[in-house]
Amino acid sequence: MFGAMSAPKGTNLTWHVGEVDKDARAAAHGHRGAVLWFTGLSGSGKSTIGHRVERMLVDRGAFAYVLDGDNIRHGLNSDLGFSPEDREENIRRIGEVSRLFADAGALVVSAFISPYRTDRDRIRGLMGEGEFVEVFVDTPLEICEARDPKGLYKKARAGEISNFTGLDAPYEAPQNPEVHLLTAGLSVDEAAAQVVRYLEEQNILGDS
Ligand code: ADP
């Protein structure tokens, strides 16, 4: 069952308990559900490494799925911008969606900058023990800026984007991530393999 829930505005709501529980879902999928929460600066490699993790997991028969920043902002969160309030709501909704996917039995790769520690910890608090795997994609700002895969740092430096994480908006690094990827010394494959190894060590992958 879910942990702490935010209070709904609606009344006369009841939580319907289904016939299929977590263990039954895990047995059907061959592994448990979990949220792999990738956090790091823009251009740090969350999306690239996250997709490689998804590839590796699906190749071994797992039910894995990437929730990626820009895709969600095009759909579910198209009404939100980059103010602190909107960033918080962005991450809150993504956390709820991640939780639903994990409850459905998926290994959810959530790849979002998610710069605020309290926002990430709130999502951790929604999940059961061992179901939230924080993956810190730790790439120095200088390297992210040199890569600049989407040209965003250039725009931010030119004053075309404000509230840009790492420049004029803060990034609060995880203090105790389950997986700490120092990407400067790793290939994408090596970084992804480090995440998969953690899941194996924690027996999250089961037989898959
Ligand atoms: P984010 O999702 O964190 O904004 P992206 O994955 O979109 O970052 O961009 C990271 C860029 O860095 C990609 O162009 C990727 O090919 C490149 N890159 C170079 N080396 C690495 C590495 N070791 N790990 C991850 N990405 C790397």
Image (cartoon, rainbow, N blue to C red):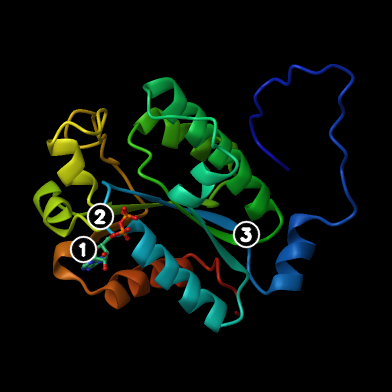
**Which residue is nearer to you in this view: 154 or 43?**
154
Ligand 1 contact, mark 2 (Cβ < 8 Å): yes
Residue 116 percent coordinates (x, y): 35, 31
Q: Is mark 3 on a helix, strand or loop?
A: loop
**Three-letter amino acid code at the position of disc 1:** Thr
**Which residue is nearer to you in this view: 97 or 151?**
151
**Three-letter amino acid code at the position of disc 3:** Gly
The Cα–Cα distance between marks 1 and 3, rounded to whole angstroms, is 26 Å
Numbered disc in front, either 2 or 1: 2
Residue matched to label 3: 33
Sequence-wise, the earlier of marks 3 and 2 is 3
Residue matched to label 2: 44
The image quadrant where one finds the C terminus is bottom right
> Residue at 90% across / 53% down in the picture?
19
Residue matched to label 1: 183
123 vs 144, left or right, is right
> Residue at 87% across / 43% down in the picture?
17
